[in-house]
Image (spheres, helix red, strand yellow):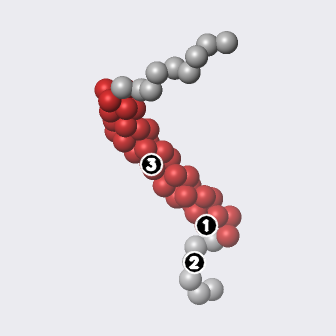
Amino acid sequence: MQADPSPPSKLQELMVFLTLSVFIWPFLAMAFVGTYGFAFWIYFLTAGPPGPG
């Protein structure tokens, strides 16, 4: 069995942070907003538009 690996360097931590903050989180946010809008669109497609009547 191997010993514990060495802790990540500051450069590795910076690269992980930049990858998450620049690439992954914005696309996840767009996916969540798009899914929310798509769900409402499907709901209004089946239930009709809001309002009286």
Amino acid type, mark 2: Pro
Alpha carbons under labels 3 and 2: distance apart: 25 Å
Please indicate, yes or no, whether residue 23 appears anywhere in the rendered image: no
**Along the horizontal axis of the image, is 49 left or right of 33?**
right
- Who's the residue at 58% across and 16% down the image? 3
Label 3: state its secondary structure.
Answer: helix
| In the image, residue 42 above or below residue 14 | below
Q: Earlier in the sequence, mark 3 or mark 1?
A: 3
Please name the amino acid that badge 3 sits on.
Met
For this orientation, the residue located farthest to the top is 1
Residue at numbered disc 1? 44
Residue 21, image x, y percentages: 37, 41
**Which mark is nearer the camera, 3 or 1?**
3
Q: Kindly report the distance in space between the C-alpha atoms of the residues bearing marks 1 and 2.
A: 8 Å
Is the C terminus in the top left, top right, bottom left or bottom right quadrant?
bottom right
Report the residue marked by disc 2: 50
Between residue 10 and residue 38, name the one nearer to us.
10
Residue indicated by mark 3: 30
